[in-house]
Amino acid sequence: MLSQKDFEEILLTNNILKEKELKDYLAKARTAGKKLEDFLLEKKIISSQVIYEAAAKYYKLPYIDLKSRIIRKDILFIIPEITAKAHQTIAFDKDDKELKIATLDISNIELFDYLGKKTNLEISLHLTSPENISEIIKQYHKGLSAEILGEKENSNNNGLENITKEENLKTLAQDLPVVRVVDTLLEYAILEKASDIHIEPTDQEVSVRYRIDGILRKVMTLPKTAHAGIIARIKILSNLKLDEHRLPQDGRFKIKTSDYQVSFRVSIIPTFDGEKVVMRLLPDQAQQMSLEQLGFQPQVLEIVKRNISKPHGMVLVTGPTGSGKTTTLYTMLQILNKPEVNISTIEDPIEYKMPGVNQCQVQPKIGFTFAGALRAFLRQDPNIILVGEIRDNETADIAINAAMTGHLVLSTLHTNDAVTAIPRFIDMGVPTFLISSTINIIIAQRLVRKICRNCIESYNLDAKTYKELEKEFNIPELEKNLSQLGFLVKKQKIKNVLFYRGRGCQQCNNSGYKGRLGIYEIIEINDEISQMILTKASRAELQKAAVKNGMITILQDGFIKAKSGITSIEEVLRVTKE
């Protein structure tokens, strides 16, 4: 956790190593491909306690030894376990004025400010060793298990998992340990910027996983006895039936504090080992983002802005589930949302609230469908209509007719690339003359993880990776296209290009990635492509024409971002493989 420069200075100023010894060990560490600190600790040349006691003197901070210390649960849980692990920071004591924190990373000002605001206490910073942090982290599991198992012992039933009567479930869901466990799970997820929480029962235990930057990670395992209470608590929060265990249920609840306001969309399904819960985290307000921040290349930004500013026509965003289509549409709506226009949306469900926009949610049980809402919108004098998804022939027909009669329609479609949206509409029975005259632009997208800026490093492709690339893609054609677009020097080969990756560090939870952005391909329907749609050209012919007209494919956009150090080549391959 110490920077290389500071670490070397600490070793020299505290006479832990002489200058000649330091140079020797630096050379050996480089040869081994390791950081100097890791090398010295691994070879047991210096103990971590010596290093961090010296670092504490260097930074003029107190050093704290926590190895044999038992920390009160209410203090320990001020910092959730997943945050303590990720940021190597522990709360170990507090009084009326200050909260005492032990850390390995004194540069994490954002976390310390957050803890100060959360507790309304002054933060007293202490340095400690990695072994100390590891020992204290074990106390999270001991405390949590003991508290939940204690509930079983105090219960008059044969175990929490056997409680099925509604009144008993209600009592169980309101017990303090269960409330705290659920609150902690939710707080962890918000702090770690998770998009989903999965609570999954197995035969012996309950697994908790978070989806962070699109990847599921296991963060906690709880005793099976905790399952009934956790599910009951979530059902009460979501206003669902406590005694229904055989049918799926869907609900929603909201958490509001001074720091955040988040809605949780809850889905519960019965499985062989009990009920499984998935909660989608939705910030109550759409994040204010620009098209540039989403990841659009400068050369296509102008095309997007030109087409969304047209008074009528259709803008389509395509891609698989979870590829960021809704975020792209909301970003466009933020640009278009002005007092002089009337915007109506029909969604399933409403993910973000947007001031000044009339948002409706489909209710299939009462016949309020996408198609039904669209018909109603056309009597509401709209300028812009957002349709959450075009799923059927009727919705496609009404949406495309609305686009033809003077409205700007924004919508999503489930296809793997931009070109496939055209034959998909034809399959839905939409006449080709309507498709060619009403669609302005089609955007296909995927989400890739961004390389962590704290541990980014450059490298050249090895022979094995290059061979894998050759199997998946036509490398000469890719090189030719990227060269024509100006992203490769003439005759430059991909095998000689410098790419980037993340080594993995505490800030990115050793994943090498932090955050996500889009990779895109965009077709603007010009006269040539419009004519080809009328003559029912094949998908391959349309793709060829789009590329000839300057379309950057998703793969090319991914390679450009990998070459620029925004994402890794492995990420691009992961999301573009079909």
Image (cartoon, grey):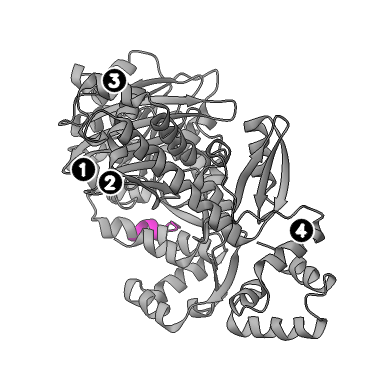
- Check whether the beta carbons of the residues at disc 3 and disc 1 lie within 8 A of each other: no
Which residue has dot 4 on it?
56
Per the image, label 2 sits on a secondary structure element best described as helix
Which residue has dot 1 on it?
426
- Check whether the beta carbons of the residues at disc 1 and disc 2 lie within 8 A of each other: yes
Which residue has dot 2 on it?
422
Relative height, residue 316 to residue 360 (above, below): below
Position in image of residue 496 (x %, y %): 53, 80
Q: Earlier in the sequence, mark 4 or mark 2?
A: 4
Query: Which tag is nearer the camera, tag 3 or tag 1?
Result: 3
* Residue ID at (34%, 28%): 233
- Check whether the beta carbons of the residues at disc 3 and disc 2 lie within 8 A of each other: no
* Residue ID at (60%, 48%): 90
Per the image, label 1 sits on a secondary structure element best described as helix
- The three-letter amino acid code for the residue at tag 3 is Ala
Q: Nearer the viewer, residue 55 or 369?
A: 55
Per the image, label 4 sits on a secondary structure element best described as helix
